[in-house]
Image (cartoon, rainbow, N blue to C red):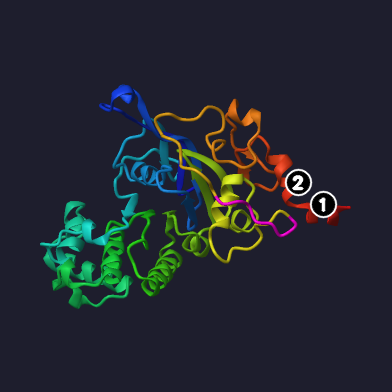
Amino acid sequence: MNAITAENLTKHYPVRSGGRAKGRVVHAVDDVSFEVPPGRTLAIVGESGCGKSTIARMLVRLVRPTSGRVLVQGEERIDARAIQLVSQNPWSALNRRKSIRHALEQPLAVHGLATGRAARTARAEELLGLVGLSPDYLTRRPGGVSGGELQRVTVARALAVEPEALVLDEPTASLDVSVKALLVNLLLDLQRRLGLSYVLITHEIEIARHMADQVAVMYLGRLVEYGDAEQVFGDPRHPYTRSLLAAVPGLAGLGDGAGVPPPPLAGDVPSAVDIPSGCRFHTRCPSAADACRRTEPILEDSGDGRQAACLRLAELTSIASPAADNEQT
């Protein structure tokens, strides 16, 4: 049974001002579904504004979906402890006027997980140990701790209520390069030790490649590609995924069979209020045809367990993989 199942998640925000847009809606997320098996990591990637963080907030019940639902272990739970959030900015996630002891012991007291001060202190020290920090940090305040150490504290706080899954919303975005590696290794170690499931929200493709078992690629509120991480990163099928990954230095396997990489993304992401007709990516897609402007594609199996939402999927896949065709003949 999956640790997390998202079924047709949709979130629209009404526009309450703004002239002609007033009374319409912002399509933050539209009909997104995915599964996260126990002990595995799903990375959700895409450009800023594609809906990744909105999904994170719906998973931890900070916002209510317009429609759709989130299941934990197959059940539509209301237990706030089941899925916990680790945000991208540890300085804003913690009260700077309070000690780290307060940050770790407060959720224990609220949920009745440790009775008495001595028990809460012992548990707080245990949580710090899990993230590689000494008990001395209990007396410190966020302003006296480095960014990497503070993000470890936010991870410890998320673990305090013994969740089944963590939503990691850009967990390394505010950290230096050397500190990012330490945090990623810590998260992977905790996953192995505690059997945690992760939903990783990130724009850092290298972080996703290192951590993810599965990948969901989003564009303008919708999933455009979904499947095994190694396959998606090594041989992307959707034109948006190919262009997105081609912008990352060092990624191989993105040519057209003749070593020609996909063209870089041109133009801007359309308004989430004025959604383009047909395929939402057609206004920037170098492979768009007339049908793409009229018909909105749905996620379909590409033949190897992956899914992609592209009307020209079979045609573009055969063009991009002539070497594979030659091997078969």
How much space separates mark 2 and mark 1, taking CA atoms? 8 Å
The picture places residue 106, in percent across and down from the top left corner, at 17, 57
Q: Which mark is residue 46?
A: none
* Image: 67 above or below 187: above
197 sits to left or right of 142: right
Q: Is residue 224 above or below residue 151?
A: above
How many residues crowd around disc 2 within 10 Å: few (fewer than 14), some, or many (20 or more)?
some
Which mark identifies residue 318? 2
Image height of 142 relative to 59, above or below: below
Q: Looking at the rendering, which quadrant does residue 213 occupy? A: bottom right
Ranked by sequence position, the earlier of labels 2 and 1 is 2
Whether residue 310 appears in magenta in the rendering, the answer is: no
Which residues fall within the magenta stretch? 257-264
Q: Which residue is mark 1?
A: 325
Identify the residue at horizontal 59%, vertical 63% (top origin). Answer: 251
Counting from the top left corner in percent of width and height, residue 16 is at 26, 26
Q: Nearer the viewer, residue 26 or 208?
A: 26
Q: Nearer the viewer, residue 237 or 187?
A: 237
